[in-house]
Image (tube, rainbow, N blue to C red):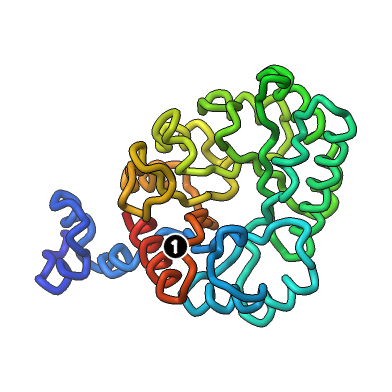
């Protein structure tokens, strides 16, 4: 027979649980249910940190605000980054390739594509040294000179050339969805990964970026276990990316439920604008808002 809940048990369960779920959650397992939290860890993309100072000073500010990790940019001074990571205890959540916009893998010029490939390989080596498990990569961009089909074929060809390096350093390549007029639907993302067909390549899902095209929660079931990392970002159709969490159009409860359904756990990396992390107080507010996101 199920134990009846007393008032203390009910309060521990919290108001977020539906009344219909209370009987099943009562009894010996109630405390475990109440204490359960999503296994998503807070980090910040290094390039968006507005707090002034050296690498060490920025990471110290992140640590003090309650963050667990950072996403370094590629091509930083490896020794400086490692010393800052060691000193603060922060983890490298990911590494963002810093060359993929200026030297896209889809460029018409073979020389530019080679430079972009070299940049990706360096990002993979950086991530391997920092202990990060993936590199964020924008695969290319559609322009007047580069058709969608060209972007598809060229970027896949170059990504395949980087896979041996990825395998050697034990780091995955994570494709990010961005505003590059390329891969604007979840099925296209799935098809892109299917064509590469290698476990070393997955997805870095940017939640805010999809809202321009379709709700983020409709992408998550399609990408499923291929989602390696998350960029946590708010977007307002009326005001753009300049809004804080819960001031835009992200449906966080629906997004988090979709992530629960595919069993996501790992890093949630803020890519909020730098003015939202320019001071210790701002960083603490950002961290608190991310906690609310993950609890939605």
Q: Residue furthest bottom?
A: 87
Q: Secondary structure at mark 1?
A: helix
Q: Quadrant of the C terminus?
A: bottom left
Q: Position of residue 180 (x, y in %)?
A: 60, 32
Q: Residue at x 81, y 40 (%)?
A: 116
Given residues 277 and 81, the one toward you in this image is 277
Q: Is residue 143 above or below residue 246?
A: above
Q: Position of residue 256 (x, y in %)?
A: 38, 48
Q: Is residue 9 above or below residue 220?
A: below
Q: Residues within 10 Å of mark 1 (few under 14, many from 20)?
A: many
Given residues 129 and 242, the one toward you in this image is 242
Q: Is residue 19 above or below residue 153?
A: below
Q: Quadrant of the N terminus?
A: bottom left
> On the image, which quarter does residue 35 sit in?
bottom left
Q: Is residue 192 above or below residue 240?
A: above
Given residues 264 and 245, the one toward you in this image is 245
Q: Residue at x 16, y 69 (%)?
A: 11
Residue pointed to by mark 1: 276
Question: Can residue 267 be seen here?
Answer: yes
> On the image, which quarter does residue 27 sit in?
bottom left
Q: Position of residue 18 (x, y in %)?
A: 18, 51
Question: Can residue 200 be seen here?
Answer: no
Q: Residue at x 57, y 37 (%)?
A: 177
Q: Position of residue 128 (x, y in %)?
A: 78, 59
Count of numbered marks:
1
> On the image, which quarter does residue 90 sit in?
bottom right
């Amino acid at each position: 027979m199920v134990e009846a809940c007393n008032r203390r048990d009910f309060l521990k369960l919290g108001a977020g649980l539906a009344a219909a779920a209370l009987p099943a959650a009562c009894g010996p397992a109630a405390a475990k249910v109440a204490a359960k939290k999503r296994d998503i860890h807070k980090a910040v993309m290094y390039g968006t940190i507005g707090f002034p100072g050296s690498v060490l000073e920025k990471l110290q500010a992140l640590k003090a605000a309650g963050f667990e990790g950072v996403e370094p940019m590629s091509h930083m001074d490896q020794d400086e980054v490692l010393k800052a990571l060691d000193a603060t205890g922060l983890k490298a959540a990911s590494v963002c390739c810093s060359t993929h916009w200026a030297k896209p893998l889809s460029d018409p010029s073979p020389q530019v594509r080679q430079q972009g490939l070299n940049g990706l390989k360096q990002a993979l080596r950086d991530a391997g040294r920092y202990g990060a498990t993936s590199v964020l990569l924008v695969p290319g961009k559609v322009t007047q000179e580069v058709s969608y089909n060209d972007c598809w074929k060229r970027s896949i060809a170059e990504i395949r050339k980087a896979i041996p390096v990825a395998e050697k350093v034990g780091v995955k390549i994570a494709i990010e969805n961005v505003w590059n007029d390329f891969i604007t639907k979840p099925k296209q993302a799935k098809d892109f990964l299917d064509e590469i067909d290698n476990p070393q390549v997955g997805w870095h899902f940017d939640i805010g970026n999809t809202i321009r095209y379709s709700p983020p929660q409709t992408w998550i079931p399609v990408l499923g276990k291929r989602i390696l990392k998350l960029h946590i970002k708010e977007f307002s159709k009326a005001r753009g990316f300049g809004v804080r969490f819960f001031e835009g159009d992200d449906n966080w409860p629906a997004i988090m439920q979709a992530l629960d359904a595919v069993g996501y756990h790992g890093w949630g990396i803020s890519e909020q604008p730098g003015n939202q992390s320019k001071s210790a107080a701002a960083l603490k507010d950002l961290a608190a808002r991310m906690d609310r996101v993950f609890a939605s």
